Image: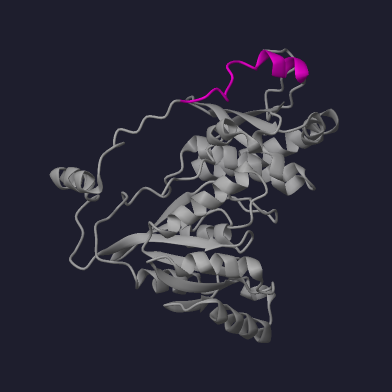
C-alpha cells in the first residue's frame, strides 16, 4: 500500500489505485439456486415439512403480518417514508432520480402485527440496461406483497408517468392504498386537486395524506396498511430491522453522498461496491470503491487535491457510525468502468439485477 494513503477517509491517487486493483470484480459469477426446477407444490411441501420456515417466535391468536410495497415515480418520497416508518435512516435519499436502486426491506414491529416495508426503485421509462433492471425489480414486488402503497407527490402535476405506474398497480392482486406525499410543501387546495386527479387514475382500498419530514400521518399510514394484513406468523425476528447486509448499507451510504454533492450526468453513472469489512476491537475497517464511466467523472469525484472524495467519505463514515453504533475507518477508491450501466454482468455485480417473476 502506498505511503501517501491517508489514515482517515481515503483520498487515493492513480498509483494507489493501481496497487489496489486486485481481482476483477466484474468477472461473470455463476449463480446457484438450490430450489431451481422445483414446482410450487414441491416448495409448499418443503415448507410444510420444516416448521422452522413458518416464522419466528410464538405469536398470539389474531396476529397479523405481511409485506407492503412502496411504489411510485422517481422522487415520490418512497425512501423518505420508509425511513420515517422505520424510525431511522435505512434507505438513502436525494433529489436525483434513480437514487433507490436496490430493493430495501425494513421491519416494523407493533403490538399485534409485523409489517415488512419494501422500498422499490422509482418506476420510469428506462434509458439503459440499468433502468430496465430497476423497473423489473419494482414491478416484481407488485406480485409478491399484501399491500401496494402507491405514492404520488402532492407538489407535482399528475402526468403520463403516474398513469403508467397506475396501470401496473391496478393489475396487482394486492390491496391498494393511495399515499399523497410531501403535504407540507403543498397548500390545501393543491392537496385536494391531487387527490381528485389520483382517483381518476384508478380505484383504491384506502387513501392517506402524509409528510414524512414533518412526521405527519406516518403512524396513521402504518395503521392504515396494517389493517389490510392477513393473519400470519412473524416473518422476521423482532430484533431484525432490515434485510440489507452491512456491505449493501456501506455502498448505499457512500453513493448517497456522491449523489448529493455532484450534479449533471455523474449521479446516474455512479455505482459503489463495498470491497471489505473488518471488525477490530476498536474500529470497523471499511474499504469501498466508487465506479464511474469516464475519466473526467473520476476527476470530479476525487476533486482538487482529493477534497471532494474526502468530504464524501467523511459524511458516509458518519452515517455508518450512527447506524452501526461503532467507530468506522473508511477508505475509498475511485475507478472507471466504461458503460457499466449497459453491461449485464456489471449491473449484477453492483446488486441491481431485477428479480424474475
Where, by quadrant of the figure, is residue 162 drawn? Answer: bottom right
Whether residue 22 is in magenta: the answer is yes
The span shown in magenta is 14-29
Q: Residue at x 55, y 52 (%)?
A: 135
Whether residue 271 is in magenta: the answer is no
Q: Would residue 214 be seen by someone viewing this image from the given angle?
A: no
| Front residue (pair 272, 127) | 127
Residue 222 vertical position relative to residue 11 in the rendered view, above or below: below
Residue 88 vertical position relative to residue 228 in the rendered view, above or below: above
Q: Would residue 352 be seen by someone viewing this image from the given angle?
A: yes
Where, by quadrant of the figure, is residue 305 drawn? Answer: top right
Q: Residue at x 62, y 42 (%)?
A: 129
Residue 348 vertical position relative to residue 137 in the rendered view, above or below: above
Q: Position of residue 72 (x, y in %)?
A: 56, 63
In the image, is 212 to the left or to the right of 60? right
| Front residue (pair 37, 214) | 37
Q: Position of residue 297 (x, y in %)?
A: 79, 35
Amino acid at each position: 500500500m502506498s505511503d501517501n494513503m491517508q489514515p482517515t477517509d481515503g483520498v487515493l491517487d492513480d498509483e494507489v489505485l493501481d496497487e489496489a486493483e486486485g481481482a476483477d470484480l466484474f468477472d461473470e459469477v455463476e449463480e446457484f439456486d438450490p430450489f431451481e426446477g422445483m414446482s410450487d407444490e414441491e416448495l409448499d411441501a418443503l415448507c410444510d415439512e420444516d416448521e422452522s420456515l413458518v416464522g419466528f417466535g410464538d405469536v398470539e391468536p389474531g396476529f397479523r403480518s405481511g409485506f407492503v410495497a412502496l411504489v411510485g415515480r422517481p422522487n415520490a418520497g418512497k425512501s423518505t417514508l420508509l425511513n420515517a416508518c422505520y424510525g431511522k435512516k435505512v434507505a438513502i435519499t436525494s433529489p436525483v432520480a434513480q437514487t433507490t436502486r436496490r430493493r430495501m426491506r425494513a421491519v416494523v414491529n407493533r403490538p399485534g402485527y409485523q409489517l415488512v416495508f419494501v422500498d422499490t426503485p422509482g418506476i420510469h421509462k428506462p434509458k439503459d440496461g440499468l433502468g430496465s433492471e430497476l423497473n423489473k425489480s419494482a414491478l416484481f414486488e407488485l406480485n409478491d406483497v399484501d399491500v401496494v402503497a402507491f405514492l404520488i407527490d402532492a407538489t407535482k402535476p399528475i402526468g403520463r408517468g403516474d398513469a403508467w405506474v397506475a396501470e401496473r398497480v391496478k393489475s396487482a392482486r394486492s390491496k391498494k392504498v393511495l399515499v399523497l406525499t410531501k403535504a407540507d410543501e403543498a397548500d390545501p387546495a393543491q392537496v385536494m386537486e391531487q387527490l381528485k386527479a389520483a382517483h381518476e387514475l384508478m380505484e383504491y382500498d384506502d387513501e392517506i395524506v402524509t409528510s414524512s419530514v414533518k412526521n405527519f400521518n406516518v403512524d396513521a399510514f402504518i395503521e392504515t396498511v396494517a389493517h389490510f394484513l392477513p393473519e400470519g406468523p412473524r416473518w422476521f425476528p423482532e430484533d431484525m430491522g432490515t434485510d440489507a447486509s452491512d456491505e449493501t448499507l456501506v455502498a448505499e451510504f457512500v453513493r448517497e453522498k456522491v449523489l448529493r454533492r455532484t450534479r449533471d450526468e455523474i449521479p446516474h453513472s455512479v455505482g459503489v461496491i463495498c470491497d471489505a469489512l473488518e471488525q477490530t476491537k476498536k474500529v470497523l475497517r471499511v474499504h469501498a470503491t466508487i465506479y464511474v464511466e469516464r475519466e473526467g467523472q473520476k476527476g470530479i469525484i476525487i476533486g482538487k487535491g482529493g477534497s471532494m472524495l474526502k468530504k464524501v467519505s467523511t459524511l458516509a463514515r458518519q452515517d455508518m457510525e450512527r447506524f452501526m453504533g461503532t467507530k468506522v475507518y473508511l477508505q475509498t477508491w475511485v475507478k472507471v468502468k466504461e458503460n457499466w450501466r449497459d453491461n449485464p454482468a456489471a449491473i449484477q455485480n453492483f446488486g441491481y439485477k431485477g428479480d424474475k417473476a
